[in-house]
Image (tube, grey):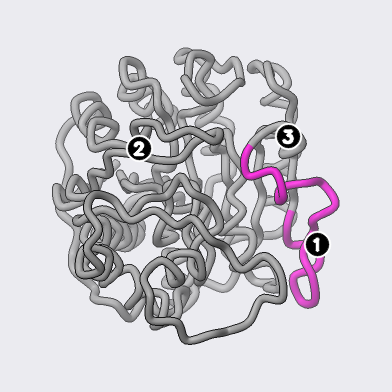
Amino acid sequence: MQIFWDPRQLAHAPSIEMHNGRIEPCSETPARAQAILDAVGPTELPRDQGEDPILRVHPRAYVDFLKSAHDDWCAAGRTGDALPYAFPAVRRRSLSLDRIDARLGRYAYDTCTPIAAGTWTSAYWNVQTALSALEALETDRTAFALCRPPGHHCGADYMGGYCYLNSAAVAAEAAIAAGRSRVAILDIDYHHGNGTQDIFYARGDVLFVSIHADPATDYPFYWGHPDETGEGEGEGATLNLPLLRGTGLTEFERALDQALDRIAAFRADLLIVSYGADTYAHDPISHFAIETRDYPLLARRIACLGLPTLVVMEGGYALDALGHNVAAFLSGF
């Protein structure tokens, strides 16, 4: 299996986030990537494919905002990380507002996604990493993109949940542009991949299946409920399988079997796995009970689909075990 990574993904180094109503140190740190690198062995540098693949998913206005937001924050006399704090929740209008505080709210839905000096650089190379891993599937059955920061919470034109550019969605669009006809995305992060769902919600050529913590109790709360099944041409192309806190291997495997049956019925010709190691029993911000020894078993079940598979890294915050959990999952392929 080829593993792709770019050290410029370490440039994103925010110091704070707003979490549960408190200012706290940011959980999504460069140390996450380093822990994975220490465990998975040699990696390959991605090829720079430019902004065109990104712009198939994310509008130019949003991309330009990400590029300039931190500089604009500093130009306004501010210091540190740029954090949104005002959101257009009532009578939303598409206003052209110059002040960076307003634009942060326009393109965000939470206060735990700070923009630091290196955020755009890391997000850009995150996507290039996923695209190069996708290319590797021309010769290999499986490839791993060590993507950091993660991507599955950000939609086409908004950031949230530590996510800025959606690498899984960009890879899916690139695959379709290259001739794939039916792409399945399996999201097995602890938290629902609301951004990925939103991007493809009205599409019939991309199946989105997510196994995640029940949004009645866990972030992102407002998305990931079982009655969200798609709309228009995408009706039936979204499957949400929320699970209770405390879920262990047996319950997770039941949901995974249901997910894999749906993917097989969809007749996908490519599988993208948004993999989060925050399903781990001792993750500091999550509440499932999956152990390190369980990850190869889950991966082997996924591999039994026999599909070309791109694994994209999402969450996972137990630094002492993160690398072992990722390596264990990859070993199952």
Q: Is residue 182 left or right of residue 142?
A: right
Kindly indicate the quadrant of the structure image that contains residue 42.
top left
Residues at circles 1 and 2 in contact by the CB criterion of under 8 Å: no
**Viewer-proximal residue, 17 or 269?**
17
Q: What is the residue that sits farthest to the right in this orientation?
A: 227
The circle on residue 214 is 3
Figure check: 207 above or below 56: above
**Viewer-proximal residue, 240 or 255?**
240
Residue 162 percent coordinates (x, y): 42, 47
The circle on residue 236 is 1
**Viewer-proximal residue, 81 or 126?**
81
Q: Quadrant of the C terminus?
A: top left
Q: What's the magenta region?
A: 219-238
Figure check: 329 above or below 189: above
Residue shown at the point (80%, 62%) measured from the top left: 236
Q: Which of marks 3 and 2 is nearer the N terminus?
A: 2
